[in-house]
Image: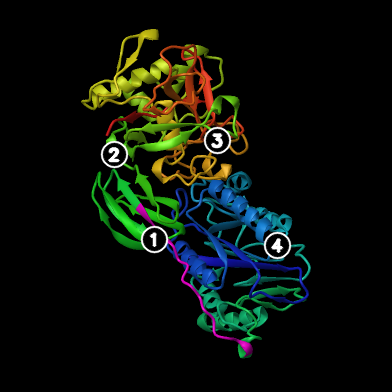
Amino acid sequence: MKKFFFLLLISYLSITTIAAENKTALVIGNGAYSHFSELSNPKSEAIEMKNALQRLGFDVILLLDGTEDQILDSLSEFETKLEQRGGLALFHYGGHGVQVNGSNYIIPVEADIPDERRVKSRAVDIDEVLGVMDVSGSQTNIVILDACRNNPLPGASRNASRGLAVVIDPPSDSIIVYSADAGTTAQDGLFTPALLKYLETPGLELGSLLRKVRTDVRTASGGNQRTGEYNQLESEVYLAGNGSDSGNRTPGFVVDESIYGSVKVSVEEGGTLFLNGIRMGDISSSRSATLSDIETGSHFIEIRYSDKTESRNINVSENNTLQVHFSYRSSEGGPLNTEGMIPVTGGTFSMGSSRGNDDEIPVHTVTVSSFHMGLYEVTQGEWESVMGATVVHQRDKVNPDWNLEAVGSNYPMYYINWFEAVEYCNRISLIAGLTPVYSGRGENIQMNMEVNGYRLATEAEWEFAARGGNASLGYDYSGSNNLDSAAWYSGNSGADVHPVGEKQANELGLYDMSGNVWEWCWDWYGNYTSEYQINPFGFSSGSNRVDRGGSWGDGGSQSTFRGNLNPYFRYTDVGFRVVRRP
């Protein structure tokens, strides 16, 4: 394997001594590719870079094995922080990359790119990164592209070239540094280790740092690799401070401000758990393990099975136990089982919102008992295995000429009405050897919450879980205040449904509680009352049933937002998830 690197630094000060000002970094390491060869180094190198930058005082966003959407989401988060903080911006990427028609692209882990014609639509142009830095108002900008392999695209690619392209019109007061001459590739493991070797040296100006790196690379390669530079710097840049105040320092008192949380990891298929690339231990099938005293912030966890790897980017918060479930099963298909659900410990919360629509008030106190909730919305594959019908069949029940959204076993089911969702719950209960919850037909359907079968969530259960249950951090959306991170909605969905579980989970480990598809609930829709309630399940009759969560076609729904629909109708953006008693 070969590597090529690209470092772009833009500075808008005549003299830059970066020691005390705000410093923000986005570090991405991609290795577990679905359609390209897997890379073993980028993730570990990204973690080393993150640790070094944090020691230098950077606020670091870390993304490992990023999909296209996750990369773009992290860039949005990066831009927001830069707008708030200003100062120095640093972007570091490790993984597959390619140059096509003079443009540089980084390749997401899920990207299927058979030839260079698909690169523009399925990879991320480095101009996206430069654009973020340009509009954010950051003072000094550094971009490092550590992109592995010489043209990873399969087959002959006439326009995809080796190495990365020279920036034709670099900004003034900038430096562009290549680990090897522009348009060529470099040996693996030379440039980045040398860069990290000197990165934290106080008083070492960037130009001097790069000369040391150049010497180390040339020596280690036996003279075969030489770094290239295009230098337009008009300023001095000190990443670790200029050291000018070393003779005037006074003793300091620093309080250790590290704070910690925990992560509870559950699996369906047995595998080995890794945290930030470090082996933690083995977890047997249908078991869980808890990682305690994890420093708050972004981390990367993996379960490595005998035949594949499943991974998550997580965010640990103070004194909170984040629940993460890995759903891979070696024999795919079949209905959802208990191991595919998240336990939700009962509690008391304030339901509704005084900042929302009129039907979200009055805010009132509600207590719900413990229950289990489906990790994901019911998928098309699960529906077909239980009901024997595809989403196409469901669409044809309405009108064969109606629009069909995305189809696939891992996409949420849609075009199902409320009654069909109830029937699914009863069928899956019987398959699992449980007692069905629902009895009766049509308007006379009754629910028995005392039995152990699967059912729809009540509206109160749904909102309690969406807000994070007893672990709630008070986010507007389920799991985040950043709508792009939490949900597929009209602003990022491309007007279509997406596979389940691609967005950030909430505090309980539940996915897609905001966006993707609306979710049917049990309750008849009606106005709230101010009375304290225990396990409410709505009105005894009505015209519309409650649905919650918003969808790919909406502008974004907070966890308190209420929808209501005719239970006989089928929609392209309405599905459901199941719950059951513990």
Front-lying residue, 139 or 31: 139
Residue hosting label 4 = 138
Tell me, for residue 558, which label it has, or none: 3
Give the residue at x 36% y 34%.
374
Which amino acid does the dot numbered 4 rest on?
Ser
Instruction: Using residue 150 as the reference point, say whether residue 472 is left or right of it.
Output: left
252 inside magenta stretch = yes
CB-based contact (under 8 Å), mark 3 and mark 2: no
Residue 81 sits above or below residue 208 on the image: above
- Secondary structure at badge 2 equals helix
Residue hosting label 2 = 339
The earlier-in-sequence mark between 1 and 4 is 4
Instruction: Using residue 389 as the reference point, say whether residue 13 is left or right of it.
Output: right
Q: Quick one: quadrant of the C terminus?
A: top left
- Secondary structure at badge 1 equals strand
- What is the crowding at mark 3: few (fewer than 14 residues within 10 Å), some, or many (at least 20)? many
The earlier-in-sequence mark between 3 and 2 is 2
